[in-house]
Structures are given as structure tokens and as C-alpha cells.
Image (cartoon, helix red, strand yellow):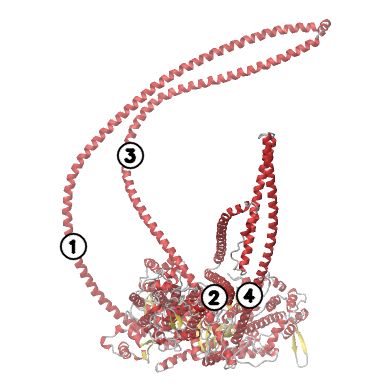
Amino acid sequence: MAAALYSKFARVWIPDAVEVWRSAELTKDYSPGDAALQLQLEDGSELEYKLNPKDNTLPPLRNPDILVGENDLTALSYLHEPAVLHNLRVRFIDSKLIYTYCGIILVAINPYESLPIYGEDIISAYSGQNMGDMDPHIFAVAEEAYKQMARDERNQSIIVSGESGAGKTVSAKYAMRYFATVSGSSTEASVEERILASSPIMEAIGNAKTTRNDNSSRFGKYIEIGFDRRYHIIGANMRTYLLEKSRVVFQASEERNYHIFYQLCASTHLPEFKALQLGSTDEFHYTNQGKSPVIDEVDDAQEMQTTRRAFSLLGIHERQQLDLFRILAAILQLGNVEVTGRGSGNCSVSAEDRHLTVFCELMMVSCESMAHWLCHKKLKTATETLNKPLAKTEAVDSRDALAKHIYARLFTWIVSQINKALRSSSMQHSFIGVLDIYGFETFEINSFEQFCINYANEKLQQQFNLHVFKLEQEEYMKEQIPWTLIDFYDNQPCINLIEAKMGVLDLLDEECMMPKGSDGSWAQKLYNTHLKKSAHFDKPRMSNKAFIIHHFADRVEYQCEGFLEKNKDTVNEEQINVLKSSEFAFLLELFQEEENAPGPTGTAASGRTKMARVGQSLREHKKSVGLQFRNSLNLLMDTLNATTPHYVRCIKPNDHKSPFMMDPSRAAQQLRACGVLETVRISAAGFPSRWTYQEFFIRYRVLMKQKDVLSDKKLTCQNVLEQLIQDSDKYKFGKTKIFFRAGQVAYLEKLRADKLRAACVQIQKTIRCWLSRKKYLRLRQATVTIQRYVRGQQARALCKSLRRTKAAVVIQKYQRMCAARRLYQRKRAATVLLQRLLRGHAARLRYRQLWYEQKVVVVQRCVRGWLARLRYRRTLQGLVYLQCCARRMLARRELKKLKIEARSVEHYKKLNVGMENKIMQLQRKVDDQHKENRELLERLIVVESSNVSELEKLHSQIEALQGVEEDARHLGDQVSTLEEELGLTREELERNRKMVEELNEKNDLLKSEKDELNKLIKEQGQQITDKLQKDHQELIEHLQTDLNEERSRYQNLLTEHLKLEELHADLLSEREAAAHMSKPGHIRTDSAYSSNESQYTHCSEFTGSEVSLQGQEEELQGAVDVALLLKLQRRVAELEQEKLNLQSEWDSREEQLQQDHAKELEECRRTLGAERDYEAQKRQELESDNKRLKKDLNELRMSLSLGKGSGRASPGAPAYKVLLEQLSSITEELEVRKEEVLLLRTQLVNLEAFKYKEAASEGDSGDTSRSPTLDLHELNEDGELWMVYEGLKETNRLLESQLQTERQDHAEELEALRAQLQALREERDQQQELLANTLKLPQDGRVHAALQHEISRLTRHNVDLMEQMDKQDKTIRKLKKQLKMYMKKVEESDQIQIDQPILDNRASEALSSVSIIRKERQCQGMLECRKEDESKLLRALITDLKPRGVAVNLIPGLPAYILFMCLRHADYTNNDQQVCTLLNSSINSIKNMLKKKGVDFETVSFWLANTCRLLHCLKQYSGEEAFTKHNTPQQNEQCLLNFDLAEYRQVLSDLIIQIYQQLIKCMESVLQPMIVAGMLEQETIPVVLGLKPTGLRKRTSSFPEESSYTLDSILKQLESFHSTLMQHGNDPNLVKQVVKQQFYFICAVTLNSLLLRKDMCSWSKGLQIRYNVSQLEEWLMDKGIQVGGVREMLEPLIQATKLLQVNKKTEEDAKAIATMCTALTATQIVKILNLYTPVNEFEERVSVSCMKAVQALLKDRQESPQLLMDSKTVFPITFPFNPSHVALESIQIPASLNINFLTSL
């Protein structure tokens, strides 16, 4: 068979140095004896693979592609290392699946990326599922452990191991989260929260950065999660192992110390850390050795805040935290203490060393003592004690040992505090342990820590091997298969080498006790003892201080240097004593705990077994670390052996922390180290592939002949296997399964594929023949048809050609004529145009010539005049100049003569005579001369200005003439230009003609374009209209969605409220049960069951059996429950007392207010009396003034009349005017006085009216004829004011009433608008603030913030409603009191009338025999129920009523009709107490019924229908127009008369919502186990393409499988639900909502299971599921409820099935997928594509390009990243009004109800 498998095209794995294993394909068949294989690699290169000539071992075969990607590695046909690596790589890289089973191991690969597979929905999906039914997950392992603990009552352990950075801590955290979510916590604070709070603390003090991991755990821990008898978490306990203390004092390059030191240094700026005197990490020796103080993307200061919050959450208060940080700061200071000295015994530490001083200050110890004992040690002999100085190196080691010891004590103290916080006072029934421990480690230099870690892994591997061997043996024995011993690796010799007598640890302890023991001497002892004697021990060739141990995973070389020192872990006792002498209380507490510690330092603070107490600290220090670790490891192994283990192996895919990338060499190394490959080897040695007979028959039915198929499938499979596989050792038949050895399933798959391939060839041959013949016939028929049509076309073409020829001749004739006529007209028009232009041009030339000549004459005339004037002025100037010259000459001569005469005295004397006169004359002459000069100068200026203006005019005329000449020249040029233009114009005319033709053509085009645009505009208008309609529809849908969301929020809040009510009721019942247990025989009733019920509300009582049962349950309650009950009892009593106090205070306040009101009324009366007196006095004064003014007026009139008669005062006289002015002023004053008097009289009338009303209110009804207006005639003697008052009274009243009404309406409207505006503003501000705050939050937090806001808004609304209800209650009580007072007054008045004497005795005697008959109103459709019969009524209608009998025999909703008819009678009699009692009692009885029989679907459905009917009756007969318009006249007459039950309608609406949700829960609980089996697992279409050969071995420890369900089971159950709902009379709309909810639930559960099951994601399964969905759709069509959104609930599932069936290769396929899958989220689409697995070789996997294209197309979708659908979603329910057509008077009550005590009216 081997040679047959190694045939051509077979694929094998060959070793590779880089990829570990490479795939290759045989290009030639292998024959036995061949020395090499001819292979072709995947890159196309050829390779000759030489076989080993010794054993001729063939390379391992590769599994078929359909087997690749299995959930369980042991299900592979070929089980070996390359198959395991390839399967993990395909799942991890291609399918993005990080979990894989390997037998009982869960292999978890670190994705280095956050994945959405750990939410609450995933936990719910895995809860209750068997391991193997769903895809591998850490939740599946946790569920398996939890179920085994609950079923077998055996403790469980989950062992999580792996390298540093593989994800061990995260896996352990998710497992604990699963336990907390599934089981719940019985305490007030969740244990999960406290355990998670311990994680930041343990990471801070126990994790550090290494070269492989930035957050490497440097210790191991084992967490026991405790459960009580109900399997609820009650507490936890933590044990730690092997803390790496050496890291405190030394770090390698690129590594860090523990995180807490760097967090502390990063927080030095805080005020509380100022006293620690810290600085940067570079300043301290213990933090700067690694030269890597910073971790990327980690803020140490922020991490410090997280650590401090975790400390506070676990009960470590602020003071202790500061003390803890103080010790850590002291350790850093101690590392900087400098030791000086040379040689041996000469070292010293200065007492003034700053770091030593700070250390001593922080520790509160003596600086001198510490400085001394850092450099000395005490030696004790038999006779004396000596102080020996230390060498420098020894002093440094002593200092580091002290630092490590202090840190270890601090670490132990923190762990003990965490355990105290996690410890529970309740008794632990069982536990699940989670072990988070280091995996196998090997480095370039391995020391004592790696030795201990690998020793622990050897022990765990031994336990693992024994457990796997045991499970295999159990499986074989269960199936009754002959058991043969499987050879597996036993590492007991390696363990003996380490821990046995004279083993490595024993020799190490012995060497540590030697006075001069050293690492070298210990190495020699190891060589002498174990070299060549133990196969697991070896010595390196080039070293004498190292040794090699062959572990199960690998051979590791350990360096002996440092082993002795680390194993001793010695600390100077005197240094410890110095610390114990400290005044630091926290430090003393650490070392006090050390003395009282029950175990070694490196082990847990509390174990399951108590070790012997070591009394002295010295002995404790002398106990070696190796011995301590061995003891703690043995204790751990005892714990694990006492539990059922579950294994999680974490794999680190690469060292670069790249997401979804795998390094094959690193993965293979870890798989060997963690035991996965050993599990594979053990499985492969036996029968790894296991099939049930049914699965084998379905899969390999194609290999059977018809005659081989028998009725007994087991016998059929046996016969077929004997024929197919000749070697009977290759398979075994068990009771329920067939066991195959490795490779046999692949061989069977090869046979099946060959058979299918041959069948496919035969099918293809037949189909191709049929297709070819069909194609030929189709072509022949098409050819004949084409010929017929071609010949007809040719004839039609000839006829058309002839017609066109004749038409062309006619068209040419008319076209030529048209062209000639157009040419003639064009030439004629051009000639006329030219003539017109030429004649115009000649006329314009003649006109210009004449105009030019006229202008020339004018210019000549002006020039000649100007020249004549110019000559005249020149001549005149010359004459004047000659005259001036002559006169100047004569004046000079005269002057000369005068000068000569002036020299003589005689002449001087003559001249002096009359000189003064002459001077005066001369002066006058000079003035005159000056005046003339000025005038002449002005004239000269005027003349010059006129000359200048004339000169300018002449210049302008000259320039104009020059311009005319220039124009003339230009005109000459223009003549030639015009001639040229004439030619151009002709050309332009020709162009214009062509342009006109082009424009005509364009016009035609534009017309066509216009038509097209009009058409486009119409289309766009239609599109816009459609878009607007679509937007309107979307807006309506959005508003409807918002309304549904609002309803959903309200109903969710109502659900929470109901849960709290149920919890409160349970607590009350438990309290009453406790009271019954303490006082037997006394039954206590709850008098305050509900704050909304009246005093007649009935309270349920406990029977004796119920009391005893609840008493037994109460005995099981812990101390916490009793305390909680007592607290609730006290709180209820306080609330009741507070209610009574508030009621009494309200009554007293009301009485006080009435008294105050009476006092205020009396005081008002007195005030009004005083004001009335004052007004009367003022009125009298005004009347006297009025009389005086009238008197003055009369006197004035008389005086005026007398004056007029005497003639002394005429109308124009001043006295008359004065008098008129006085008269007018007096008249005005009189009018003012009249108005004041009128106002006062009006007030007086009001006072009298008020007085009259007071008198009437006091009961003086006999004097009704008295009127306050009777005495008004006396107010004025002459009656003038009375006339005015009577005239204006009615008008004023009317105006005042209208004005008052308008003012009141306006004020109310304005106030309402203001209030509404203010409310809108506040709401807007709140919404803006909420939006701003929400936008600041991340995406996951926005939904939470919106929900919180909605809850707060609804809470405020409820508070407002409660306040309004309280106000209404107060108003009702007040009205009731007033009504009682009025009733008393009426009774008193009636009594008075009775007591009056009889006036006519005869009349009374005559009428005494006549009785008055009260006329009763006709009241049909009412039932009278006495108060004492109410309990019997509720018992008969609700408690004892059988829904099945009522639904079959009576009309639907009969109990609701009966209750309403009783309510009608109570309303008719105006009995409010009976109305409240009936409604409250009915509601409470229905609630109690649902509480007792809430799981019975028929009961819930029945009361849902009756509660809805009662609500509709309350609406139908409420009298409101919106509800009564559908009533008959008789029904309108039967409406309620006295009470408005709108509030009770709301209470009934809430009750309907509660019943509806309970109904949904009942239906979902029934459908839940059917859905997956019926929709996914059942083969509805028998043997479509067979099952995939999974061979998955489910856990033998899982619960046995339940009875299988089919699709018919689901349909029958849905039919039962629907028929029951309709029989009970539920509204069709409500039934549709129920069906819609159930179809959503079916879709959600099915799709969620599909998304978590890789075996269901195939083409054939998609076909099966689509068929099942179509059956559900047919059921909807049969019921006529496929509309209204019911079918749309199945759309996600339908699209998922389509996604499984469509092509998934190209980018076009990706676009089709993105367009088709609109109801699925992007996460769901990608998940299904990743899970898609071909069942047959003919199917293909999803291509990488298609997957990337789909992700690119879906990345812009704005949707939730949640993977699963929320199956718990409940759509908001609406129950529209549905009036009843049943007449109340026609309802007949059957005698079977036993309610004969009701009276029909």
C-alpha cells in the first residue's frame, strides 16, 4: 500500500533549513528499491530527494487539501510534525483562527492583535455546548471544566503554559472571566473584578521587560477559583512559584527590572512621593544596567495610577501603599551604596554616604549599624563570636542579597494581602484551578532559574503523558477494542536525575553545606556521579563548569557559575536584625510575617496542606531555594493529580510581535517543548481517526454497490471495509465507531475521489454529447431561419432601391431649381446693396466738401480780423512809447532847471512860503495819482486777460483748422479704405450666408438637444420626485426606528423594574418564611405589598408546605443572605415609618393651613371694613366739594348774566375772558371730581357685594331678596351719580369680563409658551452637552453613555409622574374632606327641615300612605360582585382556571369580559374602593399566576390574550371619542360613568409587556435545543455530497447528546405555538409580532452557531440550510404572515447561505459578495469566508485575492464590529386598539366557572 500511495502527483514533505518542512510533488511513481524520489517543489524547481540507504525511510505524505484546516490535529489522516505545522499555519494565517485542538490540548497562538471573539455573546454561545460541537476556543475548555466539576463533583485544573510572550496570562484571564460570567458570583462584589484588579499589581511587582517579551512574567502562579454547592463563585486563592529575585539587582542588556521601580521613578513629581527622594531611573544602579528604561507605547506614570487603583480596590489603603513605595525606594537607594576598599577585608562604607543615609531614613534604622554590617559578618564558634571583615565583592554580594530578600518579603506580603481580599467566608464546595506557569526555556546562557523552570516542566510533562495515556486507554476500553501498549516517552529517568537521591539538586544542597564549596567542585561531583551513567546527563567538550541535561523537549547546557549562590540565597543575619530594630511598623510587619510564615519564601502564602512550622529565622534562611522549589512543586503536583486537568498550550508565532505571522522554526520548537507533538505521536501510534458507522456510511456510500447496502449499517460498513482494505490491522470495529490507523482515511479518500472522478468523466461524456447534438440541431434550425429572412430582406432591398432612384430624380430637379433661384436672389440683393452704399458714399463726400469750404471762409475771416487788431495794437504801443520818451526828455530838462534853482537861498525862501499848503495839495495829488494808477492797473489787467482769452481762442481755432486739414487728408485715405472694405463686405456677406446655413443646422441641433434636455429634465424631475419620496420614506423609517428604540428602552427598563420587583417579592417571602420558622403557627401577611394599592388589596399567604420549603431554603442561605434580609427588613420598616410620619405631617400641615386661611379671611374682613369707612369719609368730602363747586358755578353764571345786562363786560373784554378761563378750569375739575366719585362708588358697591357674599356663605339663605344696591339712591341727593353708575355698570362689567378673560387667556398662553420654550432650551442644552460628551468617548462607550442618559431621563420622568400622582392624591383627599363636610351640612339642613312643625296635619295624613318609587336606569351588561366574594371571583377566574378548557369551550377573553362587567357595576354605583380593589387584585393575581406557571406556554398565552382584552375594554368603554367611534349605540350607552381609568390602562400596558416577554422566554426555551440540530445538523436533503471526513473525537467526559431534533420538530412546534395563540383570542397583530420575534431568534441562533463552527461552512451545508429556510418561508406563506417584516428576520441567514454557495475567486465575485450581503456585518462576512472549507476535492478554497478585495470593499462600512447576533434582543411590542364586537349583555356565564354568586343586571 505504501508504494501505491507514493505514486505520481502524490505530495510529500521534505526537511528544509529555513521553513523546517517544504511541500513537494512526485513527478514519477515510486517503486520499492529506488534510491531517490523525483520531486517538483511548489516554485516549479526540480529536485532529486535521496533516500536513506540504511532504512530507506520515505518522506511523510501530505494530507489532502480537504483535510487541511481541521479543528483537531488528531483528526488528520497523516499525523506527523509537518502536517501539524501546516494545519496550524493554514488556520492561523489563512483563516485567522488562533485556537486548535490537539486531542485534549488546546493550542492557542498569540495573534498580537485584538480579536472580537471574547464578548458576552461568545460566552453565551459556548455556554452549555459540548466540547467539539463548536470551534476550538478557550471558552470551550472552560465550559468543559465547569461541566465536569458540576457533573462529576470533582475539582478541575486548567494548565496554561508557554513561552514568555505567548499569551498565557491573557488566556488565564479569559478562562476566569468565563467562569465568573457563566456561574455568577454569590457575593456582593464580583470575584472576577477582584482577580482582574490583582493583575496590574502582580504585573507591576512580578513582570519585567526581557529580550523576548516586554511584559514577561518572572514567576508562576496557580489560582484556585472556589465554588459553592450551587456552583457560584465565592472566592479565590493564589499561589506563586519561583520569583526571579536576581532581577532586582541585575538585568541583562536591553532588559529592565520589575515594572514597579520604573513606575515609581516616573511618579516622583507627585507630592506624596517627594519624601522618597527619588529621581530618574538612570540614577540608580538597580534600574540602569539594561540600558533600556523605556517600553514603547507604555506610560509608566499612567501604569502607576492603575496599580494604585488596584491596590485600593483590594483593600490596601493609602497609608500602606505609601509604606510599600517607601520600601521600594529604599531598595533603589541601597543599590547605590558604594563599597570602597581593596583586597580582602579592607572594604568599608562611609556612614556619610548620601544613598546610605536616605536608605536608613526610609527604613528608620541606624546608619552606623547598617554601614558596619554591610562590610562585616558575624562568625560563631563554640567559645566565642567574631566579627569578620568582608572583601569588596563579598560586601557587594551581601548588599544585593539584602535587597533581594527585602523585595521577596514585600512580594510575599502583597500576595498574602491579595489572598485576603479574594478569600470568602463561605464554605468552598469545589474549585477550578488555573495554572499560569512558565514554559520550557533555553537560552545561550542558562542558569539556576532556567534549571528550575525546566525541572517544573519535566514534572508537568510527566503528568500530561500519564493523563493522555489514561484517556486513550479509557477510549479503547469503552469501544471494546483490544488494548495494545503504546510506546510513549517516559521522562521519569530525567526527573530522577534531577530530584532523586544523589541527583542534581541533592548534590547541589550538599555542596552548599560544605564550608568551601564552589561551583567548580559541584560540577566535578556531577561529572563523577552521572557522567556515562545516566543517558540524560552529558558534559560539554570545551567546558569544565557546565553540564548538559537531555530534557523531553531539547538538550540544554547549564552554566554552573552562580548555582551555589542562588541556591543558598543567604542573607546576613545581623543586617536582618538591624532592620528588625527599625521603628518602621510596616517593615516590622514584613519580617514578623517571615517568622510566622508556614512555608518557604518562594511558595504560596497558603497551601492546601499545612507544612511544619519552622521556628527560627536562621533555619528558614538556611533552607535552600532548590529544596523550597521542589517542595512547592510536589505540592502543586499533588493538587493537579487530585483534579481533572485541561491543557492550554500557548504558542508565540514570531519574535517580532507581528500580527498573524508565523516563524516555522520557532513554532516547531515550541510544539516540541509543550508536548503537542508528543500527543500527536501517541495518537498516531494507535488509531487516530475515528468515525461513527453513520458518518462512514454517508461519506463512503459511493464506494458501495447496491447489493452491499444492508439494513444493518454496521454490518454494511464491515463488509465494505474488508473489501477496500485487505489488512485488518489497519482498522478496528468498536461498539459505536470505526478506528483507523494513520493514513487509512487518506487512502479511502483517494478511492472515493477516483470513483467520483470516473463518475464525473462518464457524466461529462454524456452531457457533452447531449449538448453537442442540441447545439447542432439549434444551429441547423437557425441556419434555415436565417436563409428565409435573408432572401426576404434582399427582395425588400431591391424594391427600396428602385423607389429611392425615382425619388432621387424628383428631388434633384427641385433642388437644382431651388439652388438657381437662391443664387439669382442672392446676386440681385448684393447689387442693390452695392448701389445703395456707393450712392450714400458720394453724397457724404459732397456734404463734407461743402462743409469744409464753409469752415475755411469762417477761419479766414477770423484770421484777418485778428491780424488787423494785432497791427493796430502794435502801432498804438509804438506811439505811446514815443510819447513817453519825449515827455521823459522834457521832464529831465525841467528837473535839471529845478535843481539849479533849488541851490539858491532866495529860491528856498520863496519856496518855504505856503509850503505847508503846497505839501497838503501835493499829498492830495499823490493820493489821487495813486488812485488813478490803481484804476489803470486794474484796467490793464482786464485788458491783458481779454487779450489772453482771445489769444487762446485763436490758438484753438488754428488747431481746429489744422484738424480739419488732417481730417481732409484722412477722408482721402478713407475713400480707398472704403473701397477695400466693400470687397471685404462682399466676402463677409458670403461668409454670413454660410454662417446662416450653419446656424440653421445648429438651430435644428439645438432643437433636438432642447427636446432631449426637456426629456432629461422630466426624467430628472421624476428622479428628484422619486428621491424625495425615498427620502421621505427613509425619514419615516428613521422615525419609526427611533420610536421602536424608545419603546425598546422603555420595555427594557420595565423588565429591569419587574426583575427588581420579583427580587423584592422573593426577599419579602424569604423574610416571612424566616418569621414563620421563628414563630410557628403564626402567618404574617404583608400589609404594604404595593404602594399603589388600596387598603383592600389582598396579599398572598403561605401554606404550611410552602413555609416548610422556604424554611429549608432559608437554612441553606449564608450569613451574607441573612444580613441582607435583615438590612432590607430594617429598610422596609424605616420606609413604612417614614411614610406614616409624612402622612401625619401632611395632615397637620393641612389643618394648620386651614386655620391660617380662616385667620387671613377674618383679617381681610376687618381690613375691608376699615377701608370701607375710609372710602365713605372720603366720599362725603368729595360730595361737599362738589356742592361747593356747583354753588360757585351758579354764582359765576349769575354774575355773568348780571354783567351782560349792565354792559360792563363785553365778550371781548379781559374780564370776560378771565371768567371763561375760570369757568373752563372749574368744569374740568368738576369732571375729574365726578370720575373720582364714580370710582369710589364702584368700590363701595364691590364692598357691599363682598359683604353680601360673605353673609350668603354663612348660611343666611332666607334673606335672598336683599341686594347691596338697594341703598345706592341715598348716596347722592340729586341722583346724578346714580344715573351715571346705572348707565355704565353693565358696560363696565362686560368690558371688564372680556378684558379679564383676554388677559387671563393671554397670560396663560404666554406662561405656557414660556414654560415650553424654557423646557426646549433646557432639553437642547442637555442634548448638546450630551452630544459633546458622547463624541469625546470611544465607539464602545457612546452606546453606553446614550443608554445612561436615556435611563436618567426616564427616571426623571417617572419621578415627575410620581409627584403628579402625589399631588392628585392630596387633591382627592382634600376634595373628599370637603365632600364629607358638605354632606354633613346637607344632613343637618335635612334634619332641620324634618324637625320643623307640620302646618297641615290633614294633608300629611292623606299622603302618608303614598310611597315614592325610585326610577332605576336600564343597566345591562353588568355583574354585581359583593366585597366578600371578590376573593372567590379571582380564585375562580384566575387561580383555578384551566386555560385549555376555556379556550376550547368558551368564547375567547371570557375572564376579561367578566372582570370588566364587575368593574362597570362598581363604576355605576360610584364605588371607587371596589374599582381599585378589583383592578389591583386582578393584576396581582395575574402576576402571581405567571410567577407560579411562567414556564407554561398555554397559561402565559391565555393571560396575554385576556389582559389585552381587558385593556381594550377599558379603552372601548372609556367614553373617549378616539375609542368610541367604532362602538354601537348600545355600547356607547354602556361606557363608564364616574371614573377615569387611564392610569390603570398604563399599568395594564406594562403588565402586557411583562407577559409578552415571559411568553417569548417560554418559546425560546422550547426552541433553543431544536434550532441547531434542526437547522444545521440535520441532513434534510439526503446525501447531497456527503460529509467531510473530520474524524473529530469529542470528549468522553462531555454530557451525553440529547435526543436529536429535525426541521419538522421546529415546524410542528411553531404550528403549536401559532394555533394556541389564535385559540386564546390573541390579536393577529400581536401574533405576528410573536412570530417575528421567534424567527429572529431562530436566525440569530442558527447564524451564531454557523459563525462558530467551521464544519458547517461549506457549499453543501449552505444548500441544506437554504432548503431549511425555504421550509420556514413556506410555513409563513401558509399562515399568511410573510409580510410586515417577518420574513426579513431570516435575511441574514439567507445571505449567509448564499455566501457559502457563490463563487469566491475573482474581484468581480468580491464585488458581488459586497453587494449581496447587506444584512451581514463586515466581520461576519470575513468570518464566514475564513471558515469556508471544501467538503470535496472539486470545491476550491477562497482565494487570497478575493478575500483581500472583500475586506477592501467592506472597510468603509459604518457598523458594529460585533461578530455574533444578539439572540437576547426583544423587539418593542405594540398592541394597537382592537375593539370588541361582542355585546356585554349577550355574554352567557357557564356554570362550570362556579361564579354563581355574581348577579347579572
Which label sits on residue 995? 3
Which label sits on residue 783? 1
Identify residue type, mark 1. Thr
Circle nearer the viewer, 4 or 2: 2
Tell me where residue 924 appears, x and y as whole percent. Answer: 74, 13
Tell me where residue 481 appears, x and y as whole percent. Answer: 39, 93
Secondary element under disc 1, as helix, strand or loop, is: helix
Circle nearer the viewer, 2 or 1: 2
Circle nearer the viewer, 4 or 3: 4
Quickly name the residue at label 4: 1146
**Chain-order first, disc 4 or disc 1:** 1
Few, some or many residues within 10 Å of mark 3 (<14, 14–19, 20+): some
Label 4, label 1: how far apart the Cα atoms are: 105 Å
Label 4, label 3: how far apart the Cα atoms are: 102 Å
Tell me where residue 796 appears, x and y as whole percent. Answer: 17, 53
**Chain-order first, disc 2 or disc 1:** 1
Circle nearer the viewer, 2 or 3: 2
Picture residue at 17% right of the left edge, 62% below the top: 784
Circle nearer the viewer, 1 or 3: 3
Q: Please, which residue is most extreme toward the front here?
A: 1402
Residue sitting nearer the eye, 705 or 1484 = 1484
Secondary element under disc 2, as helix, strand or loop, is: loop
Quickly name the residue at label 2: 1400
Label 2, label 3: how far apart the Cα atoms are: 127 Å
Tell me where residue 1452 appears, x and y as whole percent. Answer: 39, 80
Label 1, label 3: how far apart the Cα atoms are: 53 Å
